[in-house]
Amino acid sequence: MNEEISISEDGVEQIALKTYTQQAYLNYSMYVINDRALPNIGDGLKPVQRRIVYAMSELGLKASAKFKKSARTIGDVIGKFHPHGDSACYEAMVLMSQPFTYRYPLIDGQGNWGSQDDPKSFAAMRYTESRLQGYADVLLGELAQGTVDWKANFDGTLEEPEFLPARLPNVLLNGGSGIAVGMATDIPPHNLREVAAACIHLLDKPKATIKDICKIIKGPDYPTEAELITPKSDIEELYTTGRGSLKARATYTKENGEILINALPFQVSGAKVLEQIAAQMQKKKLPMVVDLRDESDHENPTRIIVVPKSSRADIDAIMSHLYSTTDLEKNYRVNFNMIGIDKRPQVKDILTLLKEWLQFRTETVRRRLQFRLDKIVDRMHILEGLLVAFLNIDEVIKIVRKEDKPKPALIKKFKISDRQAEAILELKLRQLAKLEEIKIVAEQKELAAERKSLDQLLSSGARLKTFIKSEIKADAEKFGDDRRTPLVIREEAKAFSQTELISTEPVTIVLSERGWMRAAKGHEVDPASLQYKSGDSFKIAARGKSNQLAIFMDSTGRAYSLPAHSLPSARGQGEPVSGKVNPPSGATFEGVVIGEDDKDVLLASDAGYGFVGKVGDLISKNKSGKAVLRAPKGGKVLAPKMVNDYTNDLIVVITNEGRMLMFPIAELPRLAKGKGNKIISIPTARVVERIEFVVALTVLTAKDTLTVHAGKRHHNLKPADLQHYQGERGRRGNKLPRGFQNVDRIEVVSKAEPQSD
């Protein structure tokens, strides 16, 4: 007796709780794995699916039969074979009928059987009707031909097949998913023609490799026409290990400037996708889309219209964003876990799976042929007895009429078997006609020919292979179809960045003398006319777009980046820049620039040193900014100036001594940061003591004019006048006319603009 089991004084068997729970859970686990969650490699069905299909065949619900209420089928299934909940059983039945769920549906449904938007929106089983699809014959056609083992049902009153004699590897064709205890399965559906071709190839070349199989089976084939974008190498790896993941993507076309989504990934709801896109539009995370419509109907199961804001919108970029942020792109787990022919669960690679199924198929065909051969041998044995009776009909009649026990007498007289004697005694009078003798001889010849053919098939492995191949080809021809899921190579989906999602409206960034900032819509605003706090006034402005970064430069040469759309509106008086960033103590803000990252910008100090950098070099996510310009001792940072054309633009610099110098800006180096090169010559001592320093600096083209403001007076310098001040970089420059040497500011007027007074 087991040490962990004991008998109490009153005769009750006792067992340790630990032992009982371990055994109970182990039994439950094995039941879930073998009899609920995992499909069988032979027919690719779970027990509940197998029982539904078998029960329907027993009810005579073949493809040619009339529809019957689904409740009738479910009643038979749960009453005879599957004692579980009717709702779970009916749901399993529904899934096998949905063309958007099953690649090759087994059940033909009439009524509401759900939709792709909501697969579980099917009507109750008392309303729907069903019968088997033609494809179900692949599983049931050979059931009564001795091909499978039978077992007792749950109460032992009936028998049911352990599995169905599938003529094709349904486990791959329809796939399946399930969660057992400690394991799960996720098998994607495949194309029937491809799988059949792979089976035939393996029968011809048993030593074929997985690479050979992958040339035939390109990849899974889902019921929907969405694209499979998983790289070929990943699919091959998946088939090699039996595990991996796949990625499917919706397809779309451009129609009258709108985006038409015409196919969704497998098990993706169009209604849910619409909700996801609409939610982004409501949260203003998709400003480039203005409308969304669902035009799906019976003729077009998937027809979702996305209307871009402008005809110039990048449709491919919009779809890339939607792929990244909605179910228009979906990942699928793959796990080829199933019950093998050894009745054990195992994750199989594609080659092992197909070889094992072919082994199952070969044994099934062999059993079928042997069953037929046994029937023929038995029939021929009976025919031999009947022929003896016909040749001695008078004597047979005499024995039957006179003998009390005619069977032993017949056996003794004609040396026939008990089986033959029984057949003779069961003859009807109408079968004693002479014509019946001719029929028996003809049947003997026909059966003899069939017996010879079966003997040859069963005794020759090569002939048996050829026979199996011909049957697979016939089924592939009858039930096969073209691939629905195209395999394509696509770039990885990329969501719009926060900057890209912001509408690109023109804005003017305004900086005040005290370092207050604000953003005004448009480029036509006059910054000087805006209202400022008491004691404050306009300092500088920069024009750009709302989706760009406004870069503020402080007096220490540090640059700070802030999104233009996040700046306070110009309707108010703004906010201090120091409220958003952390400048060094005592630093003031000297300038602002905004533009594309690759645009050139002139950075200089009033000590007469500077360089040309890129806007992108000034960007920093750090609140403490980024050190860009280093001013010499005694020098101060000047406001940065945008450069339109580094090759042809000119730089004009004026000191407080009235000296002015102009030279090509290309003579200044391109740097990411630093002190820069000498722009205009100022003695170091004069800089340190703040005797002489740069008061004005600008960039202009060869055709621009320059207006120099000194107090209330101004002096216009045309291109010809500017030639007097042109020289080499680093020179002292020439003196401005008397009266204009104490310069307040300079103003560039392009040729296209009217010159101001």
Image: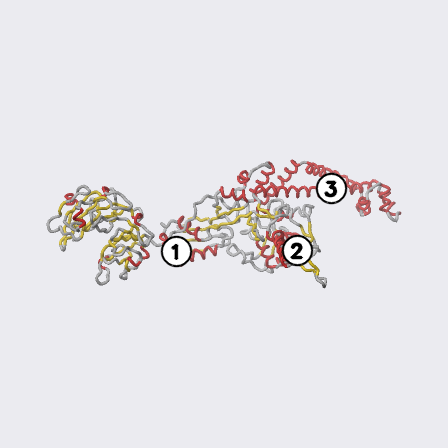
Q: Is residue 359 above or below residue 28?
A: above
Tell whether 749 sits left or right of 303: left
Label 3 to label 2: alpha-carbon separation: 33 Å
Regarding residue 445, the answer to whether it shows in the image is yes
Label 2 to label 1: alpha-carbon separation: 54 Å
Where residue 347 appears, as percent x and y from the top left, is: 57, 46
The residue singled out by tag 2 in the image is 81
Q: Amino acid at mark 2?
A: Phe
Mark earlier in primary sequence (2, 1): 2
Tell whether 347 sits left or right of 258: right
Mark 1 crowd level (few <14, some 14–19, many ≥20, 10 Å Cα): some
Regarding residue 52, the answer to whether it shows in the image is no
Q: Secondary structure at mark 3?
A: helix
Instruction: Please identify, in this view, whether the residue under mark 3 or under mark 2 is nearer the observer.
Output: 2
Instruction: Please identify, in this view, whether the residue under mark 3 or under mark 1 is nearer the observer.
Output: 1
The residue singled out by tag 1 in the image is 285
The residue singled out by tag 3 in the image is 376
Label 3 to label 1: alpha-carbon separation: 75 Å
Task: Name the foreground residue: 468 vs 692.
Answer: 692
Mark earlier in primary sequence (3, 2): 2
Task: Name the foreground residue: 99 vs 164.
Answer: 164
